[in-house]
């Protein structure tokens, strides 16, 4: 592998030689969802008998992964069945990026109305029409490069998403090139909260005053995306929300996890940071049949606690 390709692979979020898997029988491919300027593929899952006005969740895979990979390991289908919502799994390919990563560091793909970001927005519109989803309850989550793209999507489309979750990801618009992305991953810029927040405000439509709620997941032993990125994400999104960078509450969770919650001015959780002690780079899962257990272990799916369960509850998908 050449130095340039290796840097690109690292900058995209995950470095692995494993090829993406093809979509399996649990997913349905949707081929006509818009102009698709980002050259992405759309896969969906919805439980049988899903009523109209149910929530919608968009889930973005990491590098070298696929829609089916994320569907199979993340645990999200379990909660779609249990709580009643539809899922969309966007998929990129090696035609877009050497390691099949979402191009979160390319301005032409990360900005509103362009490239991959517009393709994902078109998937949202298609799914809303197909399932009759509640446009007030559309959420987005992603792992690694998918998490970094999630941050960009929340910044570009705060009028579309009610909430997000970034797993082992990068602050919105941290990078605008491959080399800058490499820097963000391993040593993110130590900007002030206001500087980070300004990057989001500059990306959003003018006059935006309502912002998505955000869950941030990070392992302390992550050597691919430095844990400092979680701190910078917290600074960015608490600033956007206009709230303090001091937690409103802190409590322990299973899987050696600490949850810091940052409430808005009405006392409702607006930003949550889940710090998983000893976890490396990946999505936190916890295989099992318990209500708070989900997913299957694998490469970049790490046995700790079920992040999808806690994220779904933070968004209120359980009806709480």
Image (spheres, rainbow, N blue to C red):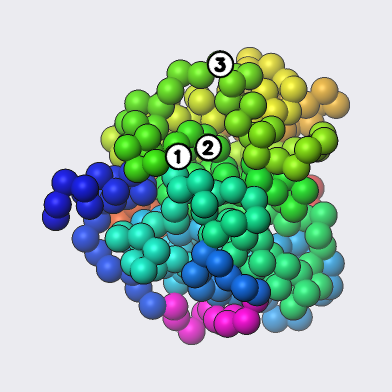
Q: Residues within 10 Å of mark 2 (few under 14, many from 20)?
A: many
Q: Is residue 273 left or right of residue 154?
A: left
Image-quadrant location for residue 62: bottom left
Image-quadrant location for residue 237: top right
Q: Is residue 26 highlighted in magenta?
A: yes
Q: Do tag 2 and tag 1 residues touch (Cβ < 8 Å)?
A: yes
Residue assigned mark 1:
176
- Image: 304 above or below 99: above
Image-quadrant location for residue 281: top left
**Residue 274 in view in this figure:** no
Residue assigned mark 2:
173
**Residue 106 in view in this figure:** yes
Residue drawn 66% across the image and 67% down it: 122
Q: Is residue 174 left or right of residue 113?
A: left
Q: Position of residue 201 (x, y in %)?
A: 69, 33
Residue drawn 69% across the image and 28% down it: 240
The mark closer to the camera, 1 or 3, is: 1
**Secondary structure state at the residue bearing disc 2:** loop
Q: Do tag 1 and tag 3 residues touch (Cβ < 8 Å)?
A: no
Magenta-tinted stretch? 23-33
- Image: 255 above or below 245: below
**Mark 2–mark 1 distance (CA, rounded to whole Å):** 7 Å
């Amino acid at each position: 592998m050449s130095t340039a390709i290796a840097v690109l692979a690292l900058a995209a979020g995950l470095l692995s030689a494993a090829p993406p898997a093809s979509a399996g029988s649990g997913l349905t491919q949707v081929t006509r969802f818009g102009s698709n300027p980002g050259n992405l593929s759309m896969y969906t899952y919805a439980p049988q008998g899903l009523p109209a006005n149910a929530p919608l969740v968009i889930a973005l895979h990491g590098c070298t992964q696929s829609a089916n990979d994320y569907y199979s390991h993340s645990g999200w289908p379990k909660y779609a069945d249990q709580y009643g919502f539809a899922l969309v799994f966007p998929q990129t390919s090696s035609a877009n990026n050497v390691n099949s990563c979402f191009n979160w560091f390319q301005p032409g793909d990360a900005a509103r109305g362009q490239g991959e970001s517009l393709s994902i927005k078109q998937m949202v519109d298609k799914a809303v029409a197909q399932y009759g989803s509640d446009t007030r309850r559309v959420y987005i989550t992603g792992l690694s490069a998918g998490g970094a793209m999630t941050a960009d999507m929340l910044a570009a489309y705060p009028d579309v998403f009610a909430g997000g979750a970034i797993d082992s990801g990068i602050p919105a618009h941290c990078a605008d090139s491959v080399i800058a992305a490499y820097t963000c991953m391993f040593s993110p810029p130590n900007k002030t909260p206001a500087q980070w927040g300004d990057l989001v405000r500059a990306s959003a439509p003018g006059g935006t005053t309502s912002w998505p709620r955000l869950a941030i997941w990070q392992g302390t032993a992550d050597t691919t995306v430095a844990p400092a990125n979680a701190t910078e994400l917290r600074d960015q999104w608490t600033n956007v929300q206009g709230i303090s960078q001091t937690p409103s509450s802190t409590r322990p969770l299973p899987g050696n996890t600490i949850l810091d919650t940052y409430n808005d001015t009405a006392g409702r959780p607006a930003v949550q940071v889940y710090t998983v002690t000893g976890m490396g780079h990946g999505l936190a899962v916890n295989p099992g049949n318990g209500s708070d257990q989900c997913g299957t272990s694998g490469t970049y799916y790490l046995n700790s606690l079920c992040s999808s369960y806690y994220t779904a509850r933070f968004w209120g998908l359980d009806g709480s």
